[in-house]
Amino acid sequence: MTRFNHHMLTLARDSRGLTQAQLAEAMSVGQGTLSKYETGVLEAPEEFAHDAGRALGYPPSFFFQPGRPYGFPPFHYRRRKKLSAKALGKIVAEMNIRRMHIEKLSRSFPFSTNRFIPEIDRDEYQGRTKKRVTIDDLAQMLRETWMLPSGPIENVVDLIEENGGIVVPCDFGTDLLDAMSQRTDGLPVLFFVNTASPMDRLRHTLCHELAHMVLHTTDFKEDGEMECEADEFAGAFLVPPDDLRRQLRRFDLPHLANMKAYWKVSMAAIATNAQRHNFITQYQYKNFFIEMSKLGYRKREPNEPPREHPKMLRQMIEFHRKTLDYSDADFSNLLCITPEEFQSLYSFEPQPKPHLRLVN
């Protein structure tokens, strides 16, 4: 018989946002006993799995899954400092559980693309040219590798999934984090996105995460430097600097609103990209954000681009349902979750979004 996996107990508890003391109280067991089960000092009896499952909303099978949770990649360190330990633990747990689901679904699903998200060796690339290779160059290199035409990227989510990634919609329960990414052996690159994030910001954040996957999975730098590089890459990938310079005929809110509608990138990101390339002065940049703050646009801008919906995970579910004849009960057994949670995670209902209008 499969043994109780103590890692899954911690994962389940974190996914519900509970401390060890809170779970012990809910289960009417001593925290010391629970601690020993979580750390593997004691092996939990089978009846404990049933009790824990009732308290946490998981079937007992959840606790007998093999494997272990993964932590954050190092380049997410700065962002995780903003989150409480409970919020961080919940996000990491959801990321791990969704990864485990994709691992199981991928065993029978025929991935059809031969395209992939590359890992760029900057030293090797630098050796091919005499001029200094910049982040802008690397962003342009990826656009060329993926044969993107000039102009805006129509759909970032589709682009990532067409090139071998999977975008996973998640409820992070906070607006402090828009997306996470993870490259693991045997799976496509995974991008976990916060469904509550505005689409203009999410497009940039997805390209920011793409930069980490392309630049930083083997070439580690200081956390702050990696974050700056990822932001610079995202800006240049979405709005190439030459195009930005040509279109930035004037720098004011109405013109940036027009540019936003064309490029599907936030006005804040366009301004930051322009300032980074010295297309505007520091004074213009500062005054722009003062105006944005007065209008209440810093957290969510008006005229949000159309929502981009991931397709790959939906296709995996539909393949199992239509081709392999999976019922909701079969999915629940496969993924070790309740039927209610399966419906909550994989019903793929579009999220409502607020409508704001630009104030002239």
Image (cartoon, helix red, strand yellow):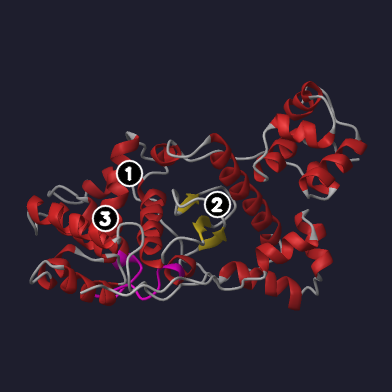
Viewport quadrant of the N terminus: top right
Give the mark count.
3
Magenta segment boundaries in residue numbering: 143-157
Magenta part, dominant SS: loop
Mark closer to the chain start, 3 or 2? 3
Q: Is residue 284 left or right of residue 176?
A: left
Tag nearer the camera, 1 or 3: 1
Residue 212 at x, y percent in the picture: 38, 48
Amino acid at the residue labelled 1: Glu
Mark closer to the chain start, 1 or 3? 3
Q: Is residue 151 magenta?
A: yes
Amino acid at the residue labelled 2: Gly
Q: Could you tell me how far apart the alpha carbons at marks 1 and 3 are, in whole angstroms?
A: 15 Å
Q: Is residue 57 left or right of residue 248?
A: right
For the residues bearing labels 1 and 2, Cβ distance under 8 angstroms = no
The quadrant in which residue 153 appears is: bottom left
Outermost residue, front side: 294
Q: Regarding mark 3 in the picture, which secondary structure is present there? A: helix
The residue that mark 2 highlights is 173
Q: Regarding mark 1 in the picture, which secondary structure is present there? A: helix
Q: Residue at x 78, y 32 (%)?
A: 25
Q: Residue at x 38, y 44 (%)?
A: 216
Taking 21 as reference, is 157 above or below it? Answer: below
Q: Could you tell me how far apart the alpha carbons at marks 3 and 2 are, in whole angstroms?
A: 34 Å
Q: Residues within 10 Å of mark 2 (few under 14, many from 20)?
A: few
Picture disc at residue 97? none
Taking 207 as reference, is 357 above or below it? Answer: below
Residue 175 at x, y percent in the picture: 46, 52
Q: Residue at x 65, y 57 (%)?
A: 102
